[in-house]
């Protein structure tokens, strides 16, 4: 014990020597560590620079997508290509005919380059490229819509927003597509479809036009979900015709002259905004008159009410927090993102009507056409659905619509196959923010890269006999697309995946069930021409059918 005590209490001279050497050692060690950190950081930087250099070198070494550079750099080439693009539209074969022709000309590669209205466009049809461009938060690319679309939908629209603002908008809107909203939309759409098929179509003489009926149904159901039934019927009808005018103007030339389609679209947008602004104003006054307890108990019956209630509650809470803890005002809460301003709400209500109505109505129309062209399959589907209908009637007591829809396997396969063949959104445009490589080709900053979903859906290496309407390819979910990700892109993929995809499939399923179990039909006019200037491919004649009751 004494020894230990002696050891700990060393003589003073020796102690000062050892403390100065340990200080020296400490500084030496610190210097070595700092030196190592600096060297490692330099090495990492150097590696990074070399990798970027290599990437750029690789990108620069990679060839640009066909056509040959000589033609691709001539000024007149853009004029020729733009005219060919427009003439495909006027010929009734649709814009995609232009794309398809070039895939054939420059194939078999997955990529070709063209120039439209002065901008370089690359069309790429490879699942790997789709993964790198559409996957979550793709670096180096941003979503790009034509200017007219962005102007008509508004700068806050989810469809057109840049990556930075998109995330917050999506966080605020996505929770509205919950189970309750889905069940409620299904019930509304079911009621409307029954009325159409059992009452309206029964009393009609001659052919009925499927597209017109589908546009009415989808508009009614989606409007109910978004803004409820507070608008008077005449105001609702005006809203529907204004939405149609906006949709028609989306691909028009951006001429603001009275009498042009674009001008009419802009005026229609303004009227829609006025109606919705009034609706927001009156609802906001009602919410302000509510007691806090009453407001807390409310759950919005439609999207607009939910967004306004959410905003009011958050504001109330943040006021209370500020009152209790004044310094917290400087603190940014993540939930702040969930506030949508009036302008953001307005642009996105319009976006949701347009994104949901025309797409779903077009998909329903194509499905009816494919079934009219495939009578044998139509009969098979009919017998399966009639059996399910009988079962449903027997179980009427505990009838659950969504559960019933879940049991319709063959109908669901029909919906998926119709969506594949119709490829309503044929390509997804993204703009390159820097030089890079896509599918082994060099892409310059500013070029627009379009993921060609339609080409993927008709790729014979992904889908056996792709031009044939064959719902059985989706049996048990074991189709090619489940083996090869990013090859079934009917609703897009990644962070921008369609928010309404379940709603769209439910509406298609309900329409299909009631149609096949109530009517047999055949095309009244087989003209395959597509509507000109339509945002999504659809038949010019709207798919007129002759009906025969079962
Ligand atoms: C058959 C019908 C439909 C089809 C084929 C379809 C297709 C698509 C596609 C392909 C995208 C992604 C576009 C891109 O990445 O550039 C998209 C986005 C979107 N869709 Fe749909 N859609 C349909 C129905 C609906 C419905 C019913 C709604 C809502 C009522 C809806 C709301 C949206 C929204 C809000 C976006 C933007 C999502 C975002 O950027 O975060 N869609 N849709």
Image (spheres, rainbow, N blue to C red):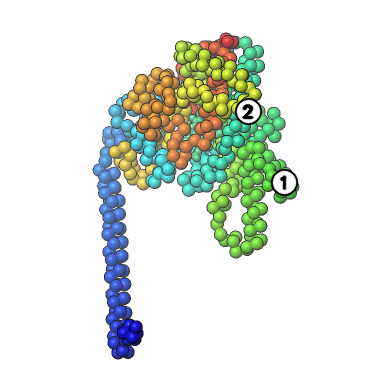
Q: Where is residue 191 in the image (x, y as percent from the top left)?
A: 64, 24
The mark that comes first in sequence, 2 or 1, is 2
Q: Position of residue 411 (x, y in %)?
A: 50, 21
Secondary element type, mark 2: helix
- Name the outermost residue toward the front: 1
- Pointer 2 with pointer 1, Cβ within 8 A: no
Q: Is ligand 1 closer than 8 angstroms to the Cβ of mark 2?
A: no
The residue nearer to you, when weighing 389 against 101, is: 389
The residue nearer to you, when weighing 218 against 407, is: 407
Q: Position of residue 205 (x, y in %)?
A: 62, 10
- The quarter of the rendered structure image containing the N terminus is bottom left
Which mark identifies residue 452? Answer: none
Question: Which residue sits at x=32%, y=89%?
Answer: 12
Q: Where is residue 130 in the image (x, y as percent from the top left)?
A: 38, 36
Per the model, the C-alpha gap separating discs 2 and 1 is: 27 Å
Mark 2, residues whose alpha carbon is within 10 Å: few (<14), some, or many (≥20)?
Answer: some
Image quarter of residue 392 = top right
Location of mark 1 (residue) = 294
Question: Which residue sits at x=33%, y=33%?
Answer: 111
Q: Can residue 303 be seen in this view?
A: yes
Image quarter of residue 391 = top right
- The quarter of the rendered structure image containing the C terminus is top right
Question: Which residue sits at x=33%, y=86%?
Answer: 2
Give the vertical position of 505 relative to 380 (above or below): below
Q: How many marks?
A: 2
Secondary element type, mark 1: helix
Give the vertical position of 212 relative to 268 (above or below): above
Location of mark 2 (residue) = 188
């Amino acid at each position: 014990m004494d020894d230990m005590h002696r050891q700990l209490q060393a003589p003073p001279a020796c102690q000062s020597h050892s403390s100065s050497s340990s200080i020296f050692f400490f500084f030496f060690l610190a210097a070595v560590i700092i030196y190592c950190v600096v060297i490692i950081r330099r090495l990492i930087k150097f590696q990074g620079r070399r990798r970027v250099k290599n990437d750029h070198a690789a990108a620069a070494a990679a060839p640009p997508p066909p056509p040959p550079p000589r033609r691709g750099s001539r000024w007149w080439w853009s004029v020729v290509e733009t005219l060919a693009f427009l003439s495909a539209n006027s010929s009734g074969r649709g814009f995609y005919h232009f794309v398809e022709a070039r895939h054939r000309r420059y194939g078999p590669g997955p990529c070709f380059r063209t120039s439209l209205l002065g901008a370089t466009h690359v069309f790429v049809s490879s699942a790997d490229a789709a993964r790198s461009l559409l996957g979550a938060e793709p670096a180096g690319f941003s979503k790009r819509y034509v200017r007219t679309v962005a102007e008509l939908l508004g700068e806050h629209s989810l469809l057109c927003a840049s990556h930075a603002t998109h995330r917050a908008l999506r966080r605020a809107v996505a929770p509205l597509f919950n189970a309750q909203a889905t069940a409620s939309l299904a019930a509304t759409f079911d009621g409307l479809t029954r009325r159409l098929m059992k009452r309206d179509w029964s009393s009609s003489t001659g052919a009925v036009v499927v597209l017109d009926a589908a546009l009415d149904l989808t508009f009614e159901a989606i409007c109910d979900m978004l803004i409820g039934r507070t608008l008077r019927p005449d105001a609702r009808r005006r809203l529907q015709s204004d939405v149609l005018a906006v949709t028609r103007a989306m691909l028009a030339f951006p001429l603001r002259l009275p009498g042009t389609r674009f001008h009419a679209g802009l005026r229609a947008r303004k009227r829609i905004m006025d109606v919705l602004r009034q609706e927001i104003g009156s609802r906001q006054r009602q919410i302000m008159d509510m007691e806090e307890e009453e407001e807390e108990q409310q759950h919005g019956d439609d999207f607009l009410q939910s967004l306004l209630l959410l905003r009011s509650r958050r504001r109330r809470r943040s006021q209370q927090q500020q009152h209790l803890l004044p310094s917290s005002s400087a603190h940014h809460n993540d939930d702040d993102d969930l506030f949508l301003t009036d302008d953001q709400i307005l642009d996105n209500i319009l976006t949701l009507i347009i994104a949901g109505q025309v797409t779903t109505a077009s998909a329903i129309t194509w499905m009816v056409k494919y079934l009219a062209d495939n009578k044998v399959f139509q009969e098979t589907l009919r017998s399966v659905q009639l059996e399910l209908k009988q079962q449903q009637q027997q179980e009427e007591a505990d009838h659950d619509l969504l559960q019933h829809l879940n049991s319709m396997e063959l109908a669901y396969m029909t919906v998926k196959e119709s969506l594949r063949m119709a490829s309503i959104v044929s390509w997804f445009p993204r703009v390159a923010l820097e030089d890079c490589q896509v599918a082994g080709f060099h892409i310059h900053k500013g070029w627009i890269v379009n993921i060609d979903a339609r080409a993927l859906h008709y790729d014979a290496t992904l889908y056996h006999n792709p031009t044939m309407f064959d719902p059985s390819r989706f049996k048990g979910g074991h189709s090619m697309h489940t083996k090869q990700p990013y090859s079934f892109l009917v609703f897009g993929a990644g962070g921008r995946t369609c928010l309404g995809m379940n709603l769209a499939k439910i509406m298609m399923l309900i329409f299909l069930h009631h149609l096949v179990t109530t009517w047999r039909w055949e095309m009244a006019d087989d003209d395959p021409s597509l509507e000109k200037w339509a945002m999504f491919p659809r038949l010019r004649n709207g798919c007129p059918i002759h009906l025969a009751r079962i």
